[in-house]
Every structure is written in C-alpha cells, then in structure tokens.
Image: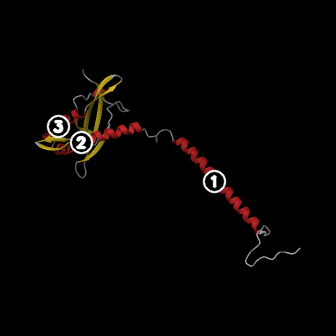
Amino acid sequence: MKKKAQPKGCKQIGFRKKGQIGTIMTWAVAFTIVLFLMIVFIIITGALSKTKSSGENEINLEESAENLNSQRELMKILNSPVEVNKKEMSVQEAIKFWFFDREKYAEVLEKEMKKVLDGFEYEYVEVETVKVRGFRVAVFLDEKELFEARSERFELGFCIIDLFGGCENLAGVYILMSDSTSVYVVIQGSQGAKDV
C-alpha cells in the first residue's frame, strides 16, 4: 500500500513518536500532585475556620449600634455650648480651662455640665415601667478620676453594669490638653424608674 503524500509544511498527527508517551506521563503525574495539594489545602483551611469561629469575631449589630449612639451622645455633650465667666464655649473647651486652673473653674464646670446632662436625659418604657436614662460624665488622667458631673436623675445604684460590677463606660474619648497630655472623658448611663 502506498502512503499518501503530505503537503509541504504539514506533519502527520498521531502517536507514532516514542517521546510523546513520556511527556503525557510527566504532565499526568504533575497534575495529580497539584490536585492533591489543592485538596489538602482546602481541607486544612476548612478545619482551621471551624476551630477559630468561637464567637470572638462575630459582630453584634445591635450592640455596635448602641455603642455608636453612645459615642454620638458623648460627642454632642462635649460640643454643647456652656457659659464660663460670661463667655460661651463648648464643654470640651471648658474642660481644658478647668484642667489648667481647677480651683477657678471646678464649680462653674460642674454646674454647666449638670445643665447639659439634664438636657440629655430621656424617658423610655421597659416592661410597662417608665424609666429615665440619666448620665454621668467623668474625666480621667492616667486612670485617676479627676472630675465628674451628673444629671439630676443619674442614680449610681441603677447604672448600666459592666463585667466587673461597676458602672459601664458607654463611650469614651481622649481630649488633648497639651502636646504631651490628654485626658479620657467617659459617659455612663443609669436606668432608674421615673418618680411619679
């Protein structure tokens, strides 16, 4: 039988060459190894993700929104206008004046802060009981409380409790007093029943 003539430049396709089997075997082994490594990686990743999800990375949207609202309340309080020595300024500025001359500004700051905090009190209903949310603002320097102001209805015995049994800091912010000193201002809330 005669072989057909091939046009110039074309090679015959087929498995008649001895080197092609070796190439296919090499690629098959390499593919199997890569596939095996991918499967092992997926299994290990899945196992690690199950052991790590113990709840520490879960986000509680209700709690996050409450913290954000508390932070906003504190910022509103710190930016509220007060009158110190017949000059209008923000609570934050008044705290700076008080920080550098505590004897002169302590009484004025406490009186003005009480007015501001009384304005932020609000009533709410919980289990058919009308309650009042009162507020307390405290100023700390190096974990030592230097100053506090309370609204009329803030009741220490009914404050929102933290893990250690004390009043929980609902929000906090640092205020820069000088290049090297800052104070930490926190807001706490109470939830006492309304006096009728």
Crowding at dot 1, Cα within 10 Å, few <14 / some 14-19 / many 20+, comes out as few
- Determine whether 9 is above or below 70 in the image: below
Could you tell me if the residues under marks 1 and 2 are in contact, i.e. CB atoms within 8 Å? no
Mark 1 vs mark 3, CA separation in Å: 68 Å
Give the residue type at disc 1.
Leu
Residue drawn at x 28%, y 37% is 187
**Is 12 displayed left or right of 159 in the figure?**
right
Could you tell me if the residues under marks 1 and 3 are in contact, i.e. CB atoms within 8 Å? no
Residue drawn at x 30%, y 29% is 159
Could you tell me if the residues under marks 3 and 2 are in contact, i.e. CB atoms within 8 Å? no
Residue 140, visible in the rendered structure: no
| Residue that carries the numbered disc 3 in the rendered image | 112
Point out residue 118 in the picture as x, y percentages from the top left corner. Answer: 21, 32
Mark positioned earlier in the residue sequence (1 or 3):
1
| Residue that carries the numbered disc 1 in the rendered image | 37
Quick one: SS at disc 2?
helix
| Residue that carries the numbered disc 2 in the rendered image | 78
Nearer the observer, disc 1 or disc 3? 3
- Determine whether 7 is above or below 136 in the image: below
Give the residue type at disc 2.
Leu
